[in-house]
Image (cartoon, rainbow, N blue to C red):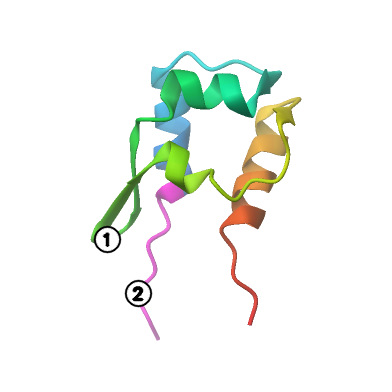
Amino acid sequence: MGTYYMAAAHNVVRALDAGGIGFPISKKDLLAKVGEAEIRIDFDKKISLSEYCSNIKIDNFENKAQFFCALTAANTAFA
């Protein structure tokens, strides 16, 4: 069984909280405020929140749940 890094979502929550992000918000405004935040997405990999959100297809988030659903979908590979 492999080892999986499970704290990426927590790291995003911390970046959103540190940036004072509230919802609703546009993707553009969210990234303008916290896009440069470094997010650890694996044991040995950090990327900017802008890069982590680059594949999100929607432009506005009504609430945090919608943002996280979009973020998860944008970073999930189906084989």
Would you say the residues marked 1 and 2 are in contact, meaning their CB atoms lie under 8 Å apart?
yes
In the picture, measured across the screen, residue 29 lies left or right of residue 12, that is right
SS type, badge 1? loop
Amino acid on which the number 2 mark rests in the picture:
Thr
Q: Position of residue 44 (x, y in %)?
A: 23, 61
Observer-nearest of 41 and 57: 57
In the image, which residues are magenta? 1-8
Amino acid on which the number 1 mark rests in the picture:
Phe
Indicate the quadrant where residue 42 lies: bottom left
Q: Residue 56 — which label?
A: none
**In the depicted structure, whether residue 73 falls above or below residue 79:** above
Q: Quadrant of the N terminus?
A: bottom left
SS type, badge 2? loop
Residue 5 drawn in magenta:
yes
Q: Position of residue 26 (x, y in %)?
A: 66, 23
Q: Most prominent secondary structure in the magenta stretch?
A: loop
Most extreme residue toward the left is 44
Disc 1 target residue: 43
Q: Of callouts 1 and 2, which one flags the residue occurring earlier in the amino acid sequence?
A: 2
Observer-nearest of 59 and 11: 59
Closer mark to the observer between disc 1 and disc 2: 1
Q: Position of residue 27 (x, y in %)?
A: 62, 29
In the picture, measured across the screen, residue 55 lies left or right of residue 8, that is right
Disc 2 target residue: 3
